Amino acid sequence: MNGASGNVLFAKSNSKVFESSEETIKTYSLLKNALETQGFGVEFSSSGENELSLADIDILVAGIPEYLKGTLDPAQVESFLTGGGSVLLLTNAFTMMNPPPSIHQVTEIAGVRFKEYLNAPASTVTRLFPHWITANVKKLELEPDGIATLSLVSDSATILAETDPPSEPFIVCASVGKGRVVFIGNAAWLRNDQIKRADHFTLLKNIFSWLARKNSLEIEKFYIPNQVNIEQADNVIVSIRNQDPENRISFKCMLDSDAGAIIDHSVREKHGLPYNQVAEIRWQLVPQKLGEQRLRFLIEPENGATLYFDYLPELVGVADGYLTLEVKNHEGSPQTRFRTGEHFIVEGTFHSTSPINFPLLDSLDLELGAGLIQRAFEPGSYKSRWYIQAAKAGCHEIRLSLKDTKQSLCAQVQIQPSVHEKIQEIVTAIKLPLNAEIAARLQQIDQSLGSEVVQNIPFKILTTDEFINALYQGESAARLEGMLLSARREQWFNPNLLKIMLTYFLPTYVPNRGVFIPFDPDLASNLGKLHPRDRRYLENNLLCSNESSIVLTKQITAAYLLHERYGHGFFYKQTRLGRQLELLYFDDKYKALIKVIDDSSTIVNEGFATWLELHFLDKLGQEIRPIVSSRRDLLIERSSGMFELALNSNYFQVHPPLYDSPYREGFEYFEFISTTFQPRCAVQLMKLANDIDLGIVEENSVIVLKKPEEEIIENLLDLERNSSKSNLRLRKMAEHLRSNKAAMADKTKKKYCPFDCIETGCPLVEAIEDKFQWRLLI
């Protein structure tokens, strides 16, 4: 069957699918009819590789209805192309999931390779590049059954159409020897049910007329700049070759803009272009507005149909200059780390490097990440300001752009949970579970250690500002607020300021009120960078820094629960002396008495809290145990202040401390008792050391002293009377036990101390009471 335009062979195809007129996904009769209308003879072959007869064939088509294994022989195809034949090869996503080797071998002849398209299915194709094949084609509509795309492995092929972003080649053509090839990543658009859509018929006609060399003109190059500075000129270039060996061709070209760009001599004419000669036509284009704009192009041959190209690749009008973006805190200082809830400022500026004859008012645009909220906006011609609130923790991008252009600049801000959110997270995820575990373990040693009255002592984690307000008033609060401000803005090594901060901002037990933990990870981080050797002190005093791991925060929280709530809390809630001191604590008229009692019990109170902390941290599991050595070093070896305290203490002038650390002496006594006997023995001797009745009671909400205040103070300062002094009682008990360790060991059981000794009497306590016979009421 011979056609005037040439013969088309469909390889590996069943002629029945080209004969049915039904509009189904399996029929291609409209394709066959269209080719015959163009004057092509249409033939079919069910033969496979090495069996195709290409004699008298001008155009070979493979891939309809699909590209099957062994459809084409690469060597045969290459020979066919070299001899002047043309090939149309189509495939789809399904084929490319497991492609036959021959498909790549064939396409690589033209420097192209099909690949699987894994992005969201493309439903339309509108990115078309000027060529005879794309003339008068505006859009293709595709079924969402998947397409394949192409990659160019050499520069011999020409891209005719791309998908929408990510803009991958979908239709490609090339010349190989004397032949021509077209590769398309989908064949479904030629089926009966789709060929009438959009501009499919036009594309079909163009493809086969080009493959049959029926195109009189060939667009060899079309250059459109991606972007052009507004009010500045750039070139648009087209190269057109005469493909008609029998005629000199005359034609007109016109270039137009949909955005009012100035184009010099938009209509150009070429007369009598000889065969196989190329005419290069240039336009100077000057954009008049910012942003994306489209050019329209047409070729009007003297004796032929007009070729329209209405959807050329977009051109972007840009301003000549550059963008700057600044992120600042509310004080105007550069900053990119914030906490949720905080407000900050973004300033965007366009710096023009050449004169612009119109203002860029409202031309700056700011795109925010999902965790940021714009609260206010101050527009300007070249500089705008946005007021932003951090809403969600994470790393968020801020993109400044010149509207409608691709000129943009990015910055990132790191948003951390607000201090209060972080506190709530620590309370919920760390403090509450730890507290339950600690209370249960302590109750196994002594019920009073983990009693409800101790468990219910408030344990508050506060911001450093809240910490000041909770613990200080008047001038003291104002002074600490000034210190805090200085510490937050400090940028240099300043050991004096650091010492002040570590002195005043630390976990504190306040009788009648509970435990107060200052929390300021930002401050700990900032001061830690200036004083790296002191980072661990800062993390201990302020609970954590921004660099602290969750495990470290958990360790420090466990330490303070044990030390403050259960150590000091036990003293104030479960010992006789502690309860009396708590009654007096906030009564200003007893300041002198409070000072003496407090000094007399400090070594015992702090020593017991330290022993309880270090002993039970080691019992809380693998995550917690590693901090024991660090806390021991911090409290026992490196802590100081007792000798300085003694200089202004009437009590310590009479009874000087043994160590500069306030924790060490008492800890050593309780540690000796615990390791030599049992942990519960240490608790019992803590009670006995503080089993001192100073005659301080509360009657009808009024504090009553059964002895005159001066007499109580005098007794506490009396060098000879040890029974009223908590620290001396503990010292005497420890010395006696150390001197009589073997005898005492016989009186205590060599196994875990049972609770029945509460009823039968603790042999250790009985031995101590027999030895010293202290009077309860001084």
Image: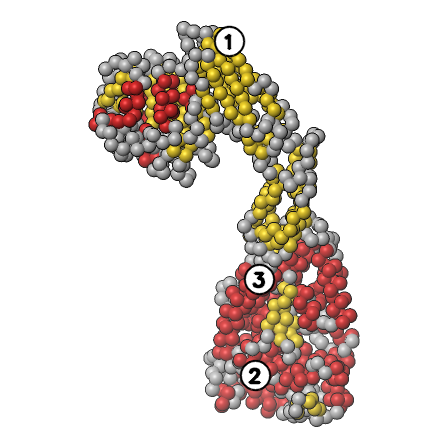
| Residue 63 visible within the image | yes
Q: Residue 375: x and y, percent?
A: 62, 53
Sequence-wise, the earlier of marks 2 and 1 is 1
Q: Indicate the amino acid at tag 1.
A: His
Q: With respect to residue 412, does 592 lie above or below?
A: below
- Give the labeled residue for mark 3: 421
Q: Nearer the viewer, residue 689 or 378?
A: 378
Alpha carbon separation for disc pair 3 and 2: 41 Å
Q: Residues within 10 Å of mark 3 (few under 14, many from 20)?
A: some
Q: Quadrant of the N terminus?
A: top left
542 displayed left or right of 213: right
Mark seen at residue 271 = 1
Q: Residue 656: x and y, percent?
A: 74, 78
253 displayed left or right of 145: right
Residue shown at 35% from the left, 36% from the top = 143
Residue shown at 49% from the left, 75% from the top = 440
- Give the labeled residue for mark 2: 684
Q: Nearer the viewer, residue 225 or 309?
A: 309
Marks 3/1 in contact by CB < 8 Å: the verdict is no
Alpha carbon separation for disc pair 3 and 1: 77 Å
Q: Quadrant of residue 734?
A: bottom right
Circle 3 sits in a helix, a strand or a loop, which is it? Answer: helix
Q: Indicate the amino acid at tag 3.
A: Glu
Alpha carbon separation for disc pair 2 and 1: 115 Å
Q: Residue 240: x and y, percent?
A: 48, 15
Q: Nearer the viewer, residue 13 or 248?
A: 248
371 displayed left or right of 174: right
For discs 2 and 1, the disc positioned in front in the rendered view:
1
| Residue 667 visible within the image | no
